[in-house]
Image (tube, rainbow, N blue to C red):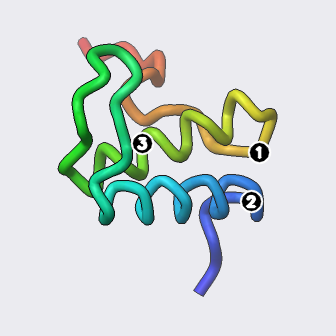
């Protein structure tokens, strides 16, 4: 099985998931506790991006034109 993300990104996601599991992960905007695993993964990838890790671009931000 191949990995989608680099080592740094994997570490950040693992850390975020661990914090989410223990109820310690807070969302950036509101500061509320994160309860969703998907949210935790997104936060981990976001942190990895800020740290300069090689992470694919966000899915929703692709600039495709639908006619």
Q: Nearer the viewer, mark 3 or mark 1?
A: 3
Q: Nearer the viewer, residue 10 or 27?
A: 27
**Quadrant of the image occupied by residue 52:** top right
Q: Tell me which numbered mark, 1 or 2, is placed earlier along the sequence.
A: 2
Farthest left residue in view: 35
Residue carrying label 1: 54
Residue carrying label 3: 42
Q: Nearer the viewer, residue 33 or 2?
A: 33
Q: Position of residue 53 (x, y in %)?
A: 78, 43
The 10 Å Cα crowd at callout 1, few under 14, some 14 to 19, many 20 or more, is: some
Residue carrying label 2: 6
Instruction: Residue at 19% x, 49% y: name it.
Output: 35
Q: Position of residue 29 (x, y in %)?
A: 34, 15
Q: Is residue 27 above or below residue 6?
A: above
Q: Is residue 12 above or below residue 61?
A: below
Could you say which disc has been placed on residue 46 in the image?
A: none
Farthest right residue in view: 52
- The CA span between labels 2 and 3 is 15 Å
The 10 Å Cα crowd at callout 3, few under 14, some 14 to 19, many 20 or more, is: some
Work out which quarter of the rendered image holds the N terminus and state it. Answer: bottom right
Disc 2 secondary structure class: loop
**Quadrant of the image occupied by residue 30:** top left
Disc 1 secondary structure class: loop
- The CA span between labels 3 and 1 is 14 Å
Is mark 1 in CB contact (under 8 Å) with mark 2? yes
Q: Position of residue 32 (x, y in %)?
A: 23, 28
The 10 Å Cα crowd at callout 2, few under 14, some 14 to 19, many 20 or more, is: few
């Amino acid at each position: 099985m191949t990995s989608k993300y680099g080592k740094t990104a994997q570490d950040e996601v693992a850390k975020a998931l661990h914090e989410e599991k223990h109820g310690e992960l807070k969302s950036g905007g509101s500061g509320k506790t994160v309860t969703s695993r998907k949210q935790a993964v997104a936060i981990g990838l976001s942190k990895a991006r800020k740290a300069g890790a090689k992470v694919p671009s966000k899915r929703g931000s692709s600039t495709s034109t639908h006619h």
